[in-house]
Image (tube, rainbow, N blue to C red):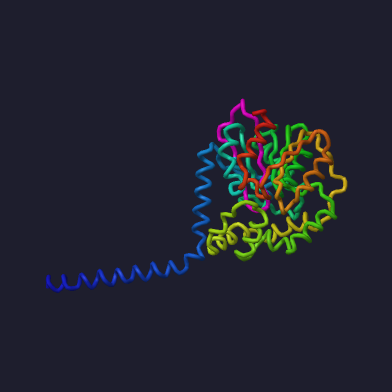
Amino acid sequence: MASSRLLHLPSFYLSTTIHMLKNLLSRLRTLHRTPFLVILVDIFLSLYFWSCGLSPCTVDLDDGQTTVHFWGSTHRRSKKPYLVLIHGYGGNSKCQFWAQVGCLSQSFNVFIPDLLFFGKSHTLSPQRSDVFQATCIVEGLKKLGVDKYSIYAISYGGFVGYRMAEIGGDGVEKVVIVSTGIGCTDEQKFEQLRKIGRNPLELLLPEKPQDLRVLVNLSIYKFNPFKLVPSFFLQQFIDVMCNNYRKEKSELAEYLLFGKADSNLPVLTQETLIIWGDQDKVFPLSFAHHLQKHLGPKSKLEIIKDTGHAATIESPGALNNFIRAFIIGK
């Protein structure tokens, strides 16, 4: 009897091993459909933000109709000025500023919201304007006890940051705007869309890895690290970052792309630093000069050489140096 059981053991272990291997192979076949790499990157970025002294929080507005998610300094230092970072259309608070937050958090009490329909922020309101985005961020900051701050905003975030400065008034001390289209005329906007030669919504909200690669090539002037990224990972990124609230994100883009430019755009009262990459193919350098002319003597333009639209990826150190020198003189 004992010998018979011993003879069955190898057979049992063999069948168990075969079953485990089949299960493993089955999972490997579907691995490309599970966004595990994107989830891991998100976890890593969260841990990194924690290590920089930031922690997440959410603020409810309009009787719970709107929720704004922030990463903000856990321990606020009275000697540090407050700096609010506003991300662009292509990501969220973590994806946009991971290369800068370590340095900037040493000099500032940092607060970084997810704009509505990006990250963990959302609303039931049908409004899709940059003014509504700005109002929600300003109100959210007030609820967090942040009443006096400077703004650093990039790309789509520049539209929102500009409106925040308008709405916030004396509560906003200084403004840094990087590579944004606010202030351009309808003629400038449609001419730039013609030069790009593609439906901008297909690039801003890609459905396929190839569309995302085109967008990245358009945004980056120097070496493109995404050339080395496999397509299945890019598809995972699209599934997680672009397909959540796709309809609402499309409406946000349509509002700015196809709506009429604000012919009565106010001149900001705050000192404003404009920063631009000299190789920006999304918003060309002429947009920067146009914006500076509109803002007048309280504005200053700094140009970063050999840098495209994605300055936060290509030249984060130069951006940090300009921001610190402008706001705190260091």
Q: Please, is residue 89 above or below residue 321 in the view? A: below
| Residue 62, visible in the rendered structure | no
Q: Position of residue 310 (x, y in %)?
A: 65, 49
Q: Which residues are magenta?
A: 72-92
Q: Is residue 299 left or right of residue 30?
A: right
Residue farthest top in this picture: 79
Q: Please, is residue 167 above or below residue 200 in the view? A: above
Residue farthest front in this picture: 306
Q: Is residue 13 left or right of residue 223?
A: left
Q: Quadrant of residue 327?
A: top right
| Residue 122, visible in the rendered structure | yes
The residue lying at 55 percent from left, 64 percent from top is 231
Q: Quadrant of the C terminus?
A: top right
Q: Quadrant of the N terminus?
A: bottom left
Q: Position of residue 271 (x, y in %)?
A: 77, 33
The residue lying at 78 percent from left, 56 percent from top is 192
- Number of disc labels: 0
The residue lying at 64 percent from left, 57 percent from top is 217
Q: Position of residue 220 (x, y in %)?
A: 64, 53
85 part of magenta stretch: yes
Q: Main secondary structure of the magenta part?
A: loop
